[in-house]
Amino acid sequence: MDRPSTSSDTRQTNVKKKPLNEEFPVEVRSQMKEFQQLMTHLKKSLQPLMENYAEIEARIKDNPLESARVDLTTVYAINSLFWVYLITKGENPKEHDVTREIARLKASMTRFKELQNRSDTLQQRSMVVDTAAASRLVKGALWTPGGENVKRAGDSDPEPTGHKKKKLRTD
């Protein structure tokens, strides 16, 4: 069923969009043109991210550090864009709650970097090989024919120092 037209519908069709050079005062036209170009560039830059979001989400799902990095970066970008929005409205963003949010995000990013550095350090430690211990393990585990590890017939095990073998009574 067709919906009835409202006065706002007729206003939108009757309003002609002015070209950029007539819409703003002469003093800000160049700044607005540059701003418009930057926003177009931002939109083009974000387009691949938006198109491949499902793939990116699947890739980071199993990695908590990578997931946290994407989340922090996304929230920081949104808050930064809101900061710019407040400036374009003529408001002072330093007096807005977004300042506290950005400060909180910076603190979270610092904590994230510390966790990432700790994780990297643990990975590097696990990759270091204790060569002396490895050498002892290999030497003790390998059997060499005719070597000192060979037990000869008639040889008895040496008694541990300070311990005597107990004989069992068989009554």
Image: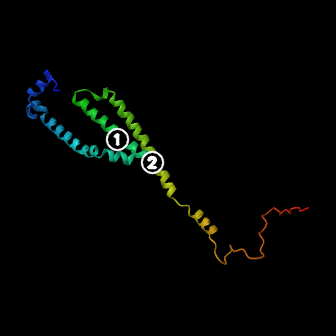
Crowding around mark 1 (Cα neighbors within 10 Å: few <14, some 14 to 19, many 20+) is some
In the displayed structure, 2 sits above or below 47; it is: above
- State the residue position of label 2: 117
Q: Position of residue 23 (x, y in %)?
A: 10, 30
- The part of the image, by quadrant, that contains residue 104 is top left
Q: Residue at x 38, y 43 (%)?
A: 69
Q: Residue at x 85, y 62 (%)?
A: 166
Res. 73 mark = 1
In the displayed structure, 11 sits above or below 137; it is: above
Disc 1 is placed on an element classified as helix
Residue found at the far right of this picture:
171
Q: How far apart are marks 1 and 2 (CA)?
A: 18 Å
Q: Which colour scheme is used?
A: rainbow
Q: Earlier in the sequence, mark 1 or mark 2?
A: 1
Residue found at the far top of this picture:
7
Under mark 2, the amino acid is Asn
Crowding around mark 2 (Cα neighbors within 10 Å: few <14, some 14 to 19, many 20+) is few
Q: Which residue is drawn at 45% across and 44% down?
A: 114
Q: Is residue 122 left or right of residue 71?
A: right
Disc 2 is placed on an element classified as helix
Q: Where is residue 135 in the image (x, y as percent from the top left)?
A: 59, 66
Quadrant of the image containing the N terminus = top left
Q: Is residue 74 left or right of residue 35?
A: right
Nearest to the observer: residue 30 or residue 50:
50
